[in-house]
Image (cartoon, grey):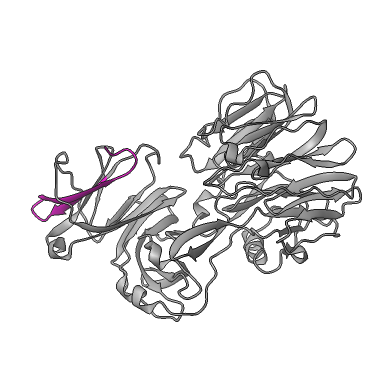
């Protein structure tokens, strides 16, 4: 029987407090990324827990029995008993577009937005995003292990050497001569386990280029022989022959947070760490600071323990200080998407950058109401996934600051899962003629990325707002919908090469103003 979701919810809390949780049955596999932690039980069934806002990535209910499992940032994949890959989750970069192959696969591994698999002949096949040529293994190469990471892929050649493919030298490990029996990718280098149980690492710190921080070199532990290894930005760890954990850490890392000297049957890490970050204000401007890659290990009794500074599902730090002025003045708009008869995702306006939580002003909470009843209170990201929606539900939301001060309730959004309709009150369907040159009456536009696409919020000049009936949304010139709220969620079109046009429509259907933005706009 697979673990219950409650067990995993406890895990997500435990990762922030104490990293141990108990298992009810032994696992045949587990995998994790910054957005999800999934396990595979002995019966081949998958169960997952998600970081806030990513619940929509849950596996399909009709998944067949799986023999392997791997997770990316917003997608996951497994292998069926017949060796066929099956993937679910986000597909913005083709992560779910598994190519047709003749041979069965025996291993699969997901990177951030791509996946690589190894077939019975040792050939590597990759699919998903290819911005760094991470889908293009050397022609004719045969491998015994494959590993996909954030913007790169690597493989262990059958003769024992490690080679990597990516055209981003800032995050591309250097090839490492073996022979090795196993390897693991760090952010900027790669470590391998030799036949005699030694750990050797390439030196990614030699690549000193701007934009991304250098991965500092860590001298591997030397108390082997080792039978397993795992690496992170902060550490290189190995399991000694008796299962004891041994690690080499960065000088700045707190050794007390690692279960060194304790026993595990296996260890693994996650290198898709782009979402593992804390938010800080540096010199008055917003900065994103990566805080490492999480490691986890399985014990003899089937329990899992996770450690390392970059614990997954981390929320921004904050105090109980009040941000009442912002909460009272910021108006939330509301939208929704229907997944099935009981599953609805509620989206709201992304907060402007100057409201992101700090020690002085913690990030506000959003309270979600269904049919007048409070059903959730959570940090004000972008969405709430309601798995207990009624056939016909009315939703409202409001902001609440750290001291309990509440902002105004949003307008009512009616969602009918039987009819598949999402209405802001009784908004009509409206189509306008092609966009002409219009004045810019918009005073603010905020946008945030989601696994389903992008969520956009806006405000307009107050002198003209009373004349506006609603907003026509166009994507790459084609009408994408009409809304009376100042919010739009695009979860259909690709993220790359997109031009979004917001057109303010008057009560007489005149076009009062427009705002265009996106990489596809001229």
Residue 437 in the image: state x and y as whole percent: 14, 43
The reply, left or right, for residue 55 in relation to residue 347 is: right
**Range covered by the magenta-colored residues:** 501-522
Quadrant of image for the C terminus: top left
Q: Is 395 covered by the magenta stretch?
A: no
State whether residue 3 is above or below residue 406.
above
Q: Residue furthest left?
A: 508
Q: Quadrant for residue 146, please give it.
A: top right
The reply, left or right, for residue 74 in relation to residue 417 is: right
The reply, left or right, for residue 62 in relation to residue 92 is: right
Q: Is residue 285 visible?
A: yes
Residue 475 in the image: state x and y as whole percent: 29, 41
The reply, left or right, for residue 487 in relation to residue 102 is: left
Relative to the observer, which residue lies in front, 303 or 380? 380
Relative to the observer, which residue lies in front, 93 or 446? 446
The residue lying at 35 percent from left, 73 percent from top is 326
State whether residue 378 is above or below residue 427.
below
């Amino acid at each position: 029987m697979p673990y219950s979701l409650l067990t995993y919810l406890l895990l997500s809390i435990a990762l922030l407090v104490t990293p141990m949780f108990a298992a009810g049955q032994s696992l045949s596999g587990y995998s994790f990324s910054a957005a999800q932690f999934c396990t595979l039980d002995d019966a081949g069934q998958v169960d997952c827990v998600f970081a806030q806002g990513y619940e929509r990535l849950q596996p399909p209910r009709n998944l067949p029995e799986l023999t392997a499992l791997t997770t990316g940032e917003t997608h996951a994949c497994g292998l069926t008993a017949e060796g066929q890959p099956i993937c679910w989750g986000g597909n913005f970069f083709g992560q779910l577009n598994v190519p047709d192959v003749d041979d069965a696969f025996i291993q699969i591994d997901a990177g951030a937005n791509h996946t690589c698999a190894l077939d019975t002949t040792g050939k590597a096949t990759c699919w998903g995003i290819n911005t760094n040529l991470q889908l293009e293994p050397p022609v004719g190469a045969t491998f015994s292990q494959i590993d996909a990471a954030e913007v790169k892929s690597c493989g262990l050649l059958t003769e024992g050497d490690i080679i990597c493919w990516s055209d981003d030298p800032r995050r591309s490990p250097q090839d490492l001569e073996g022979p090795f029996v196993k390897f693991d990718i760090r952010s900027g280098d790669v470590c391998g386990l030799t036949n005699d149980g030694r750990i050797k690492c390439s030196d990614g710190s030699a690549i000193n280029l701007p934009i991304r921080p250098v991965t500092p070199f860590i001298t591997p532990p030397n108390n082997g022989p080792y039978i397993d290894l795992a690496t992170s930005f902060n550490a290189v760890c190995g399991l000694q022959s008796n299962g004891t954990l041994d690690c080499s850490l960065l000088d700045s890392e707190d050794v007390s947070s690692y279960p060194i000297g304790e026993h595990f049957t296996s260890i693994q890490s996650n290198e898709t760490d782009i979402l593992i970050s804390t938010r800080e204000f540096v010199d008055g401007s917003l900065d994103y600071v990566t805080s490492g890659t999480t490691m986890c290990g399985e014990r003899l009794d089937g329990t899992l323990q996770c450690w390392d500074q970059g614990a997954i599902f981390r929320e921004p730090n904050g105090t109980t200080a009040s941000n009442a002025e912002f909460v009272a003045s910021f108006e939330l708009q509301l939208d929704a998407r229907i997944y099935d008869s009981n599953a609805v995702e509620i989206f709201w306006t992304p907060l402007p950058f100057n409201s992101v939580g700090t020690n002085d002003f913690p990030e506000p909470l959003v309270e979600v109401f269904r049919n007048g009843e409070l059903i959730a209170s959570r940090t004000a990201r972008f969405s709430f996934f309601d798995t207990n929606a009624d056939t016909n539900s009315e939703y409202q939301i409001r902001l609440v600051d750290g001291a309990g001060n509440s902002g105004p309730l949003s307008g009512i959004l009616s969602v009918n899962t039987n009819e598949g309709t999402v209405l802001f009150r009784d908004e009509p369907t409206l189509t306008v003629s092609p966009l002409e040159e219009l004045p810019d009456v918009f005073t603010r536009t905020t946008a945030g990325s989601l696994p389903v696409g992008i969520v956009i919020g806006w405000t307009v000049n107050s002198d003209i707002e009373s004349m506006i009936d609603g907003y026509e949304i166009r994507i790459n010139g084609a009408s994408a919908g009409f809304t009376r709220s100042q919010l739009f969620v695009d979860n259909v079109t690709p993220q790359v090469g997109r031009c979004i046009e917001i057109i303010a429509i008057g009560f007489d259907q005149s076009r009062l103003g427009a705002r265009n933005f996106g990489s596809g706009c001229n």
